[in-house]
Amino acid sequence: MAEQKETRKHYSFADNWHFYWGIVFKTKPGLIAAIIGIAISETLLNVGTIVLPTLVVQLLTQKSSLPYFATVIISIVVGITVTTVLHGLVDIYGTDRSTAPRMRMANYLNSKIMAIDYQLLENPDTQQLFDAATRNGTGWTLAGGQAFYFGVEGLTRDILTLLVLLITISFFTPLIFVLLVFSGLISYLMLQRYRRWYAANHHTRDELQRKQKYLSQNAYAIENGKDVRLYQMSAWYHQHFEENRQQLNHWQQKQSTTQLVSDLISDFATLVRDGFAYLYLAFQIIAKNITATQLTLFFTTMSQFSQLVSQFIEDLNTLQKASVDLQEVRQFLDLPQSDTTSQLTTAQRNQLKQQPMTIQFDQVTYCYPKATTATIKNLSFKIDAGQKLALVGANGAGKTTITQLMMGLLKPTSGRVLINQVETSALTTEEQFALFAPVFQDSIIMALTLAQNISMSIEPDEKRIWQILKEVGLVELVEKLPQKLSAPMTRYIDSDGIEFSGGQIQKLMLARALYKNAPILILDEPTAALDPIAENEMYRQYAAMTFAKTSLFISHRLSSTRFCDNILYLDHGELHESGTHEELMALHGEYAHVYEVQSKYYQTQDPEQEVAK
Ligand SMILES: Nc1ncnc2c1ncn2[C@@H]1O[C@H](COP(=O)(O)OP(=O)(O)OP(=O)(O)O)[C@@H](O)[C@H]1O
């Protein structure tokens, strides 16, 4: 997975073109008509601004009658007005609808991030790519997913108008035509020069912007508010923010310089072109080869042409940048997603129906992406059907990692995990997840109703929920809530949402796990935030909760795991001791030592005395 960056596919402009229009056809095919409508109406308007002054001069020099003069001019003005209104309407239609493909891409990205394996999600490279794809590809109006439309729309108009202008100018002298094409080519090459620089360097800016976003989001995040203030971290934030800002400024200066050099060269080519054009004009006037009407036509056409060349380059720039931005969207969409095709045979399927279940780790090793050493090392153990297993060990021993390997959130780097003797590699992640009801230390409360937070479904079974609330000791609290089970939770969406304390959240998470009623229960420090009475109550009920279920229990308080059928004592991802509480105590090893230290600590009930010893 560390090689993820190198293996990302490069998408050419043609690939991205195909991808974008594929989405347009699925979402708003009317955008194509909008582009054609805008191109035609704007070309007509551009031509109108050339024709109108030329015609006025011609009619005046021909000394046309006033009614004729008025009729022609009014007809043209009406024509321009009608075209302007039509153009405005098509433009509004196009700009409004052009959001749809971008939104569709944003949906693709969101669906994808939920469909990829947890292991891939955890990889920092994935997080960075998602960040870049959402910011540059779909995050705002000028992100690639929408800018692609603006670029194509602008270029279609530019090309159509430029063709009309080039034909008009070439009537004067084909040499000017050649010069115009030449200066256009120089401008294009200069744009390419800038684009190459941007493609090679925009990742640096993305990383700086990502850091800046992290810093600013952290500065105002409510959950950080206490620490930031109490630990006086504002100076740290300021310093990092300032350093990052300077680096961003430096990047932007480099970008401006690169763009400036390209612009200067391009402007010089334009100067040569215009100089020649006006010199040609001067000679023609001196030689009296040109009429007043032709002079006006030449002037207006040339000035329109200059403006349009700049516009053309700008639109080309928009389109190419949009393609670079779409690259990240596509690379993110390319990430492999969880396998949804089950490899299970009928026999294995039947095996998995047997309950209670057995779990076996067979020489499992796991190394986190980018980590230099393995977190779990060649670990083998078995949980028998209906057994309650405890995982104990110091912080960082690998307990949570083991539960994640068991549930299929992480895949072993080597070795096998077997459930009812079926290798988990044969199961889809969904099949594997369905077997477990976990209670994590850091589970999340969603901005849903209380009942939905327990059932994790849109239509909860309220009768069952009340029963479970009684089991976990939350029934009194919920009965007092005005909206009871329908109470909205968190204040992210509903400002009247209810907030639970740490201990209440833990009980709620237990209720969630019990509602799922999966064959294997995993409790990762489920009592850490409970008061002693609630903790005692929970242990009393624990036997009932885990009845006829295989269960895994993680706790730092060894006295709370005594009731388990088997205890694994881990250190640095390796199994050091295993057995029942009595067996481990008789061993007088690491477990017994930690247990004795802990029991002395709890018995004296005077931590200060213990620490002073
Ligand atoms: N996402 C991750 N990426 C890289 N390393 C990780 C990741 N998660 C955990 N680790 C590392 O793996 C080791 C084991 O972590 P784990 O959370 O499994 O330990 P634990 O025994 O559950 O600890 P605790 O008792 O503190 O909860 C730690 O050294 C930790 O630094």
Image (cartoon, rainbow, N blue to C red):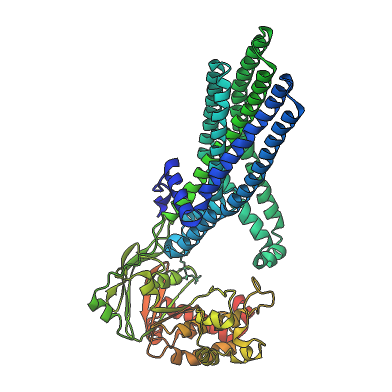
Residue at 25%, 77% (x, y): give it. Answer: 348
Residue 77 horizontal/vertical position (percent): 70, 37
Residue 257 visible, this angle: no
Quadrant in the rendering for residue 237? bottom right
User: Which is more toward the observer, 464 or 148?
Assistant: 148
x, y (%) of residue 113? 47, 61
Give whichever of 465, 189 is nearer the camera. Answer: 189
Residue lying at 72% horizontally and 35% vertically, measured from the top left: 74
Q: Nearer the viewer, residue 192 or 490?
A: 192
Residue 436 position (above or below residue 473) = above
What residue is rendered at 53% in x and 21% in y?
A: 182
Q: Residue furthest top?
A: 287
Question: Residue 201, image x and y in percent?
Answer: 53, 39
Residue 496, x across and y down, in percent: 69, 77
Identify which residue, 78 or 105, lies in the foreground.
78
On screen, residue 112 versus residue 175, left or right, reads: left
Res. 172 in view: yes
State the image quarter where residue 337 is shown: bottom left
